[in-house]
Image (cartoon, grey):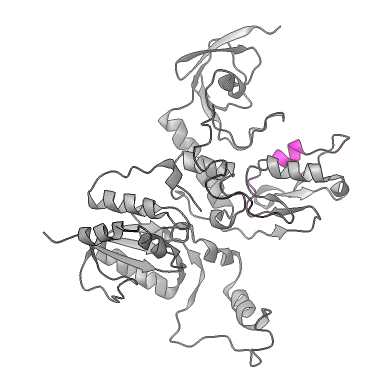
Amino acid sequence: MAELNNFSIDGVKCMAREGTSILEAARQNGIYIPTLCNLDGVPPKGACRVCSVKANGKLLTACTTKISQGMEVENDTPGLNELRKSIVEMLFVEGNHLCPSCEKSGDCELQALAYRYGMTVPRYPYFYPKRVVDASHPKIVKDHNRCIMCKRCVRAIKDKKGRSIFVFLNRGFETKIYIDPELAGKLTDELARKSVEVCPVGAIMLRGEGFKTPFGKRKYDKAPIGSDL
Amino acid sequence: MDKPVVATASLAGCFGCHMSLLDIDERILELVELVDFHKSPINDIKEFTRDCDIGLIEGGCCLDENVHVLKDFRKHCRILVSLGECAIMGGLPAMRNGISVRECLEEAYLNGPSVRNSNQAKILPNDEELPVLLNRVYPCHEVVKMDYYLPGCPPSADLIWIALTALLENREMDIPYELFKFD
């Protein structure tokens, strides 16, 4: 059995088994560290940097860094929260995030983080990239305007042989999620619904399904993301 | 002492934010006690004849005329507020930002299903009296300095009320989570 490590988050004494990530260890101790690309049950990626913390003074992503004996973690500090806010702002200017016309609004994790950090307007200029809506698949619609490249769909949606149905196409600013044409038929109704659920934003939507939850009853209408912890 | 003066404008917006301002219900009686309204579509005052304390701007800049109005507001208002998503980030009009102006005009006047057969002469409106479309829609803060931002589509009446009264009383805005929304 793995040894128990003592560590601290913002000065609060915590304990977790050796080999646990800072993120997981924080949760076990009832402390919220914001995440965006991370998904329970899927190997962490460290793609979005929203979970950045300072571990022994060094800036690291909490999802991919393991705790160690005596580690001192800084989490809920004005500096780190400002950094997280700026990361969320970058994601907002990089795509075309039109909340008023998005079916995911109210249930969107990117929007919820913006609410949590009180983002009124990004400090960076908007890119307004030209991106398309791809409705070629019979079960889902991909709106590339909203994609934040978290790779959750690539990591979580697999066929029975464990092959990723979603893949990344192109590189750099041209990167987009793409459905492997050879595996497109493997996207069952169940997997299609799951792909919509794992998408933190509204980049993957079910065909034929639009706005379904009334205002006031959506996930982040009443309380900020992370309030359940 | 004179009452503070408020001016409002709707640029590339749908007037939804102005509707939301009017949606403060009976508090509107309190509001007219608190402030005087100057240039605004609500009272139809067209030109600035004095300086104002607060300017509320709905919508982003889609036309050269929007830029002119916005700069005029910046010149005459002590505090300028971006009211709603369109003023803050361009909103739905900004959906055209990846598309050229020519393509937009051709879709609207020549190729769209509702005009394809009715515009036989293939006329694109270009009278010199008409304001000119900008290459893209600009959020207000990319044109002039904006002092405050009230998100929402539209910002709720309660949010506008809280913000406006806080500005008038020169105190910090205390905005509840439920009112801070982008939709």
State the residue lying farthest toward the front.
B26
Magenta span: helix, strand or loop, mainly? loop
- Judging depth in this view, the residue of A166 and B173 nearest the camera is B173
Q: Nearer the viewer, residue B6 or A110?
A: B6
Q: In this rendering, would A161 be left or right of B173?
A: right
| Residue A42 rendering spot, x and y as whole percentages | 72, 30
Report the side of B7 relative to A157 (left or right).
left
**Residue B75 lies in quadrant:** bottom left
Residue A157 lies within the magenta run: yes
Q: Is residue A182 left or right of residue A169?
A: right
Magenta residues span A143-160
User: In front: B51, or A47?
Assistant: B51
* Of the pair A192 and A62, the residue shown nearer to us: A192
Query: Which quadrant: the N terminus of chain B?
Result: bottom left
- Location of residue B74 in the rendering, given as x and y in whole percent from the top left corner: 30, 64
What residue occupies the far bottom of the structure in this picture? B121
Residue A209, image x, y percentages: 70, 54
Q: Is residue A166 visible?
A: no
Q: What is the quadrant of residue A10 in the picture?
A: top left
Please name the residue shown 21% across and 74% down the image: B49
